[in-house]
Image (cartoon, rainbow, N blue to C red):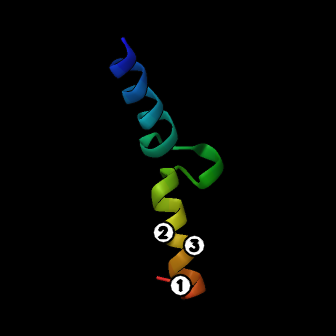
Amino acid sequence: MKQDVQHYIRYYNQIRLHSANGDLSPIDFELSLSIVSGLA
């Protein structure tokens, strides 16, 4: 059960598309910001 919860939390926080981010995953959204700001 602990492993299932960890997988779901990872999916929810890192992989799931968020409508507030323009339907991007949080990782993709952060990468797009770093590219725009020249930090990537």
Residue 39 vertical placement versus 4 (above, below): below
Q: Is residue 29 left or right of residue 2?
A: right
Dividing the picture into quarters, in which one does residue 36 lie?
bottom right
Q: CA distance from mark 1 to mark 3?
A: 9 Å
Residue at 48 percent of width and 69 percent of height: 31
Q: Is residue 30 left or right of residue 4?
A: right
How would you rate the neighbour count of disc 1 (Cα within 10 Å): few for under 14, some for 14-19, many for 20 or more?
Answer: few
Q: Amino acid at mark 2?
A: Leu
Q: Residue furthest right?
A: 20
Q: CA distance from mark 2 to mark 3?
A: 5 Å
Classify the position of the N terminus by image quarter: top left
Residue 3 vertical placement versus 38 (above, below): above
Dividing the picture into quarters, in which one does residue 4 lie?
top left
Q: Residue furthest front?
A: 2
Q: Amino acid at mark 1?
A: Leu
How would you rate the neighbour count of disc 2 (Cα within 10 Å): few for under 14, some for 14-19, many for 20 or more?
Answer: some
**Foreground residue, 23 or 16?**
16
Q: Compare marks 1 and 3 and give the one earlier in the sequence.
A: 3
Can you give x and y, in whole percent of width and height, for residue 32 in the image?
51, 71
Please say if the residues under marks 2 and 3 sit with CB atoms less than 8 Å apart: yes
Residue at 46 percent of width and 39 percent of height: 16
Can you give x and y, in whole percent of width and height, for residue 7 in the image?
37, 29
Residue at 56 percent of width and 44 percent of height: 18
The image's mark for residue 13 is none
Q: Compare marks 1 and 2 and give the one earlier in the sequence.
A: 2
Q: Which residue is mark 1?
A: 39
Q: Which residue is mark 3?
A: 33
Q: Which residue is mark 2?
A: 31
